[in-house]
Amino acid sequence: MAGIFAATAGWLVRHRSSMPTWIDRVIESAARNPDGVAGRLASRLLGGGRTGPVTEVPDAPVRVYIAPTNYSGQGYRWARALESADPRIGARNMAVELPGGFSFTADTLVPVAVVNSSAEWQSAEWAAAQSYSHVLIEAERPIFGSKFGRDVAREIAAFESNDVSVAYLCHGTDIRNPDRHSTLTPWSMYPEDPRTDVLRADAEANLALLSTLRRPTFVSTPDLLLDVPWATWCPVVVDPAAFANDVTPFASDRVRIVHAASAPLVKGSHYIEPAIDPLIRSGVVEFSLVTGTAASRMPAVFAEADVVIDQFRAGSYGVAACEAMAAGRVVIGHVLPFVRDRVEAEFGIPLPIVEATPDTLAETVRRLAEDRPAAQAIAAAGVDYVAAVHSGPASARALIDHWISPKLG
């Protein structure tokens, strides 16, 4: 029964944007209030009384535990980057498995119903976690369900009473101020996002936590430095080898364009086809909209493209853009000048994402189609950029230099 309900819940989550409003509200209520009626019912139907896998403790002088969100598989990637950077570091990540997720790899993947409802799992995971020397809390989310009242501050106090060093890693909507963001770009998603009031309240509460309990703080994308000025940028990590391919871009008559609509409103997916429709009808380009694709399939998806359109509304870039650059594809997106300046100041490399907004997208694509050698050079620059900034060493260096290094002595 739990398996059937999990499959149904996953389908509903993946299609929630097209569901009646009341279904979306029920899903949101269960997610935000696990102790409420909807949350308790969902947990019971998903098998929440069972226990689950517990994170192992590595045999290393410095032990880093990363939890609990693993957005786009980043907790797992940061753990591997740390282990590759220094043999004295053993790192593991724990991720909460949500219905309808994208199957990102994690060291320990625990069903959300177990995290929320299994006292046995909560106690066992806490016993393992307090054996680590360092804990990186992602997105200001509680790790151990109800064990500490779903209160991150209480979890931090418990860790630190055991001489565990705690740091924060902000991912995006958990800390981004919607009002500030709306002043940075006319394409901001927040004026149209029905969740904006909730996201604003979350971001304000999380910023208050970070400000009150000052600990080493990291952000996964450079735009978030506007929201947490004292933070350090820890770049997202991709595996360049997994996306490398022998397919030469811009070698066919038509320009093949792909857009992964993982978050349509946030990315501005609805702007794309209307903008490039004349190019599609004239045969200059062919366009594919990708939705609900497992992470393991994305290397093949990008290998079949010449251009990957990333996003127009956040004003930054993330894992999908890095994966597409690693695949040797030209990436188009709207990136704030602050982000471009920060990249070049920190790494001495211009960000090779081609700038465009919905208003300029068609002309941008046309220029790429008309100058194939220039487009191929941009694609090659993207491969080099990801190797330098997003392959792991730069991220490990940020975490070690600004947090872990005293223990390494």
Image: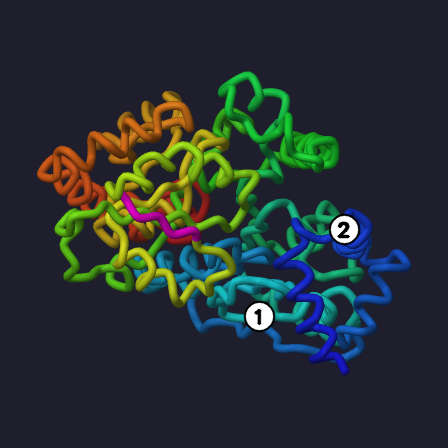
- Other residues around mark 2 within 10 Å, as few (<14) / some (14–19) / many (≥20): few
Q: Secondary structure at mark 2?
A: loop
> Residue tagged by mark 2?
20
Task: State the separation of the CA atoms marked 1 and 2.
Answer: 30 Å
Q: Amino acid at mark 2?
A: Pro
Q: Nearer the viewer, residue 49 or 289?
A: 289
Q: Residue furthest bottom?
A: 1
Q: Residue furthest top?
A: 183
Q: Residue furthest left?
A: 373
Q: Secondary structure at mark 1?
A: strand
> Residue tagged by mark 1?
109
- Which image quadrant is residue 303 in? bottom left
Do the residues under discs 1 and 2 have CB atoms within 8 angstroms?
A: no
In the image, is residue 201 above or below residue 40? Answer: above
Q: Residue at x 71, y 48 (%)?
A: 152
In the image, is residue 262 above or below residue 353? Answer: below
Q: Nearer the viewer, residue 233 or 306?
A: 306
Q: Main secondary structure of the magenta part?
A: strand
Q: Nearer the viewer, residue 79 or 8?
A: 8
- Other residues around mark 1 within 10 Å, as few (<14) / some (14–19) / many (≥20): many
Q: Amino acid at mark 1?
A: Leu
Of the two numbered discs 1 and 2 in the rendering, the one whose residue sits closer to the viewer: 2
Q: Which stretch appears magenta?
A: 285-289
If you read the primary sequence from the N terminus, does the residue marked by circle 1 or circle 2 appear first? 2
Lateral position of residue 138 relative to residue 49, left or right: left
Q: Nearer the viewer, residue 141 or 305?
A: 305
In the image, is residue 23 above or below residue 87? Answer: above
Q: Position of residue 16 (x, y in %)?
A: 68, 54
Q: Position of residue 343 (x, y in %)?
A: 31, 31
Whether residue 405 can be seen here: no
286 in the magenta segment: yes
